[in-house]
Amino acid sequence: MKPVRDLNVNKNTTIEELIKQFSSIGGFQAQELYRGYEILKEMFDNAEYKILSFPADIIATGIRGIIKELIKRKMFDLVITTCGTLDHDLARLEKDYYLGYFEADDIELREKNIFRLGNIFIPEENYGLAIENILKKALPYIYNKKKELSTYEFVWLLGEYLENHPKKEESIIYWAYKNRIPIIIPGITDGAVGTQILLFRQEHRDFNVNVWLDEEFLLNQFFGDKNIGALMLGGGISKHHTIWWAQFSNGLKYAVYVTSAVELDGSLSGARTREAISWGKIDKKAKHVTIWGDVTIILPLLVGPFL
C-alpha cells in the first residue's frame, strides 16, 4: 500500500518534477499520465522500432510544433496519420489559422467563408487555396521525379520540394523528408491533398500514389518477433493501422494511448490498451496505459521531459 501524497508545486517546478509527483497523488488521470511517462522513457531507451500515430485535427493547433519537434529529433522511426496532416501542415506554411470558440454561430461563419475546426477559425482562402498554391507546383515536381510511389515517398518528395520554402523548418513534412522518417497515410484520398492528387491525375493518368506500396513496406517492417513500441494519439485509422500491423510482430511491447473517446460504444477510438491484448495487437506482457483526456493538454506534459 502506497500512501497518497499532496502535490507540491511552485513557479520553479519543472514538467518532469510535476510528472513524477503525479505518481503519488492518486489523482485519477494524473497517475495514468505518470505511467505513460515511465513507459515512454523505457520505450525510447529499449524499443528497436518506435511508432507515432495521430489524427490530423491536432495539426491545426499549436501541437503541430511538438509533433514537428519529435520528428526533427528522430524520436520515432515511423509515423502513421491522416491526409489532413498534410493539408494543415501545408496550409499553415502559407497562411495563419486563428483562435476561435466552440459557441460561434456556424451559419454566420459560413456566410463569412470561415471554416471552424473546434475552436480554431480557418478563413477559406487560408486552407484550400493555400494548399493548392503549393501543390500546383509541387505535383509537377514530384511527377517528374517519380510517377508511381507510396504515400511516404510522396511525403518525402513533397518535403524535398519545400527545401526552398522560407518557413520549411516549421513543417512536419519537411523534417520527415530530411530525416527519412516514413509518414504512412492509409487514407490519402480523404483530404484536400488527396483531391489535388486526383485532379492532377485527370491529365496525368500515369501518376499514381499507391497505398499498396505502403503496405508492402509495412509488411517488411513488422513480420517477426520484434521489440516495438508506439505512442498513439486519438483514434481512427491511424491508431488501428498501428496496432493492426503490430500483431504481426507478436504485439506492441510498449503502448501508450491518449484518447478522449470512451469504450462503451465498442469504438476503436475509445478502446483501451487492454482490449488490444485480446487481439494480440499488444503483447500480454507489454507495458501499456490508456490516458484519457485532451491531447493538446496531455502531449506537452507527456513528452516535454524528453525534448
Image (cartoon, grey):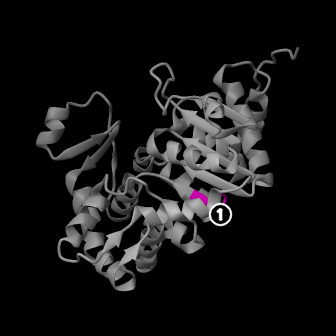
In the image shown, does 209 or 84 lie closer to the viewer? 209
In the image shown, does 305 or 162 lie closer to the viewer? 162
Q: Can residue 29 be seen in this view?
A: yes
**Of helix, strand and loop, which one carries label 1?**
loop
Q: Which residue is drawn at 23% across and 75% down?
A: 205
In the image shown, does 116 or 218 lie closer to the viewer? 218
User: Can residue 128 be found in the magenta stretch?
Assistant: no
Residue 237 lies, in percent from the top left, at 45, 44
Residue 15 lies, in percent from the top left, at 70, 40
- Tell me: residue 176, above or below residue 143: above
Magenta-colored span: 73-78
| Screen quadrant of the C terminus | bottom right
Outermost bottom residue: 144
Residue 56 lies, in percent from the top left, at 42, 48
- What residue sits right under mark 1 in the picture? 74
Residue 114 lies, in percent from the top left, at 21, 45
In the image shown, does 255 or 277 lie closer to the viewer? 277
Q: Which residue is drawn at 43% across and 54% down?
A: 186
- Tell me: residue 64, above or below residue 267: below
Counting labels gives: 1
Outermost right residue: 1
Q: Residues within 10 Å of mark 1 (few under 14, many from 20)?
A: some
Residue 210 located left or right of residue 207 = right
Give the dominant element type of the magenta stretch: helix, strand or loop: loop
Q: Is residue 14 visible?
A: no
| Screen quadrant of the N terminus | top right
Residue 307 located left or right of residue 259 = right
Q: Which amino acid does label 1 sit on?
A: Lys
Residue 66 located left or right of residue 103 = right
